[in-house]
Amino acid sequence: MIEQERDGGAVALVLTGLVLLNLDSYHHGQWDEAEALTREGLDLAAAYGYHLLKADLRTKSALVAAARGDADLARALTDEVMTWTTPRGIGLTQAFARRARAIAALGQRDYEEAYAQTSWISQPSITGTGIPARWMVLDLVEAAVRTGRVEEARVHAAAAQQAGVRSSTPR
């Protein structure tokens, strides 16, 4: 579908496909491929004025940067996203930006920052049902433990287990 529509057809579908392929590449450790998909998507989003998808793709770039240990780039990208999404109240994209910030903070051993970012998405004793919360619950548990919030970590871990949240990682 992406190949068929890439040259000006259903651009929104192409962009959505690129976002999904990007996530698959990221979660399989194929970060160079994820970055290439993001660049292609950003070019299309800019050319056709898809600002929301552009912001979403920036969060994907920030996530790869965070995973690679480039906290400064992750912060710059998420600052840009937050500047655009906050006044518009686009919580889902903000949540993805916060996920990248949390990953960057964990990599820098800034557990308070990681906790602040992850707890914005999942409040104490509540495991969110949305994708960002499910993907971030283990990061929240780690940040809570490392900041001395052990009981809160237990509550989140139990709620995640009860909700059937499974991790795609060996953690």
Image (cartoon, helix red, strand yellow):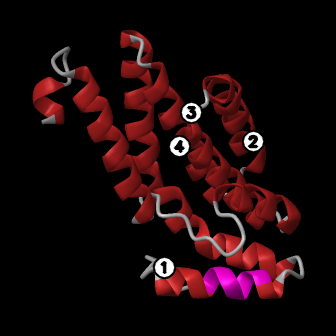
Name the image quarter holding residue 153: bottom right
Decide which of tag 3 and tag 2 comes sooner along the chain. 2
Give the residue at mark 2.
75
Which residue position is annotated with label 1? 169
Q: Which residue is mark 4?
A: 92
In the picture, residue 48 is in which quadrant? top left
Amino acid residing under circle 4: Leu
3D distance between C-alphas at marks 3 and 4: 6 Å
Residue 72: horizontal and vertical position, in percent?
78, 43
Residue 44, numbered label: none
| Type of amino acid under label 1 | Thr
Membership of 4 in magenta stretch: no
Q: Secondary structure at mark 2?
A: helix
Residue type at tag 3: Ile
Q: Position of residue 50 (x, y in %)?
A: 41, 18
- Do the numbered discs 3 and 4 sit on residues whose CB atoms are within 8 Å? yes
Quarter in which the N terminus is drawn:
top left
Q: Which residue is mark 3?
A: 90
